[in-house]
Amino acid sequence: MPGEFDITEIDDVIHGRLRLGIMAFLTGSGMADFNTLKARLAASDGNLSVQLRKLEEAGYVEIAKSFAGRKPLTQVSLTDKGRAAFVAYLDAIEKLLPK
C-alpha cells in the first residue's frame, strides 16, 4: 500500500454503496428524478430517501420537489460542493492503487 494513503481522507458520507452510486450517477447526468435513481440503483423508496437526505445534509445534492401534472416529482442534482467532494473521494481511493 502506498505510504501517502490516509484513511481519514475517505469521505464517509460518500463511501456507502448507495450514496456512492448516487454520486457516480449524478456526476454523469447532473440531475435525475427519484424514480430514475431508484431504478438505476435498484433501491427501495425508503432506503433511497434516507441516503439522499444524508447527501443533502452534507450539501452534496439539492432536492427539488414539484408536480408533473398531478404526480409528485422529486429531482436531485449534484451541487458544486458535491462534485468537489466526489473528486476528492476518487483521489483518495486512487491512492490505494499501486503506481
Image: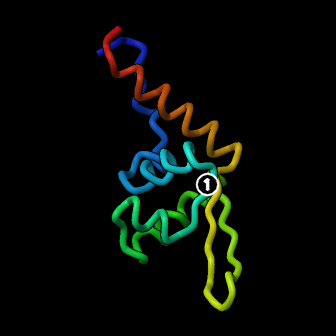
Location of residue 97 in the rendering, given as x and y in whole percent from the top left corner: 33, 18
Locate the N terminus by quadrant: top left
In the image, is residue 11 above or below residue 32? above
Q: Residue at x 55, y 66 (%)?
A: 53
Q: Give the residue at the far front of this rendering.
A: 69
Locate the C terminus by quadrant: top left
Q: Amino acid at mark 1?
A: Ala
16 and 71: which one is in front? 71
In the image, is residue 84 above or below residue 30? above
In the image, is residue 7 above or below residue 60? above
Location of residue 78 in the rendering, given as x and y in whole percent from the top left corner: 64, 51
Side of 73 relative to 92 (left or right) = right
Side of 71 relative to 20 (left or right) = right
- How many marks on residues? 1
Q: Residue at x 61, y 62 (%)?
A: 76
Location of residue 7 in the rendering, given as x and y in whole percent from the top left corner: 40, 31
Q: Give the residue at the far left of this rendering.
A: 1
Residue tagged by mark 1? 58
Colour setup of the view: rainbow
Q: Residue at x 34, y 13 (%)?
A: 2
Query: 10 Å neighbourhood of mark 1: few (<14), some, or many (≥20)?
Result: some
Quadrant location of residue 62?
A: bottom right
Side of 81 relative to 33 (left or right) = right
37 and 50: which one is in front? 37
Quadrant location of residue 70?
A: bottom right
20 and 13: which one is in front? 20
Q: Secondary structure at mark 1?
A: loop
Q: Give the residue at the far bottom of this rendering.
A: 70
Q: Residue at x 62, y 45 (%)?
A: 82
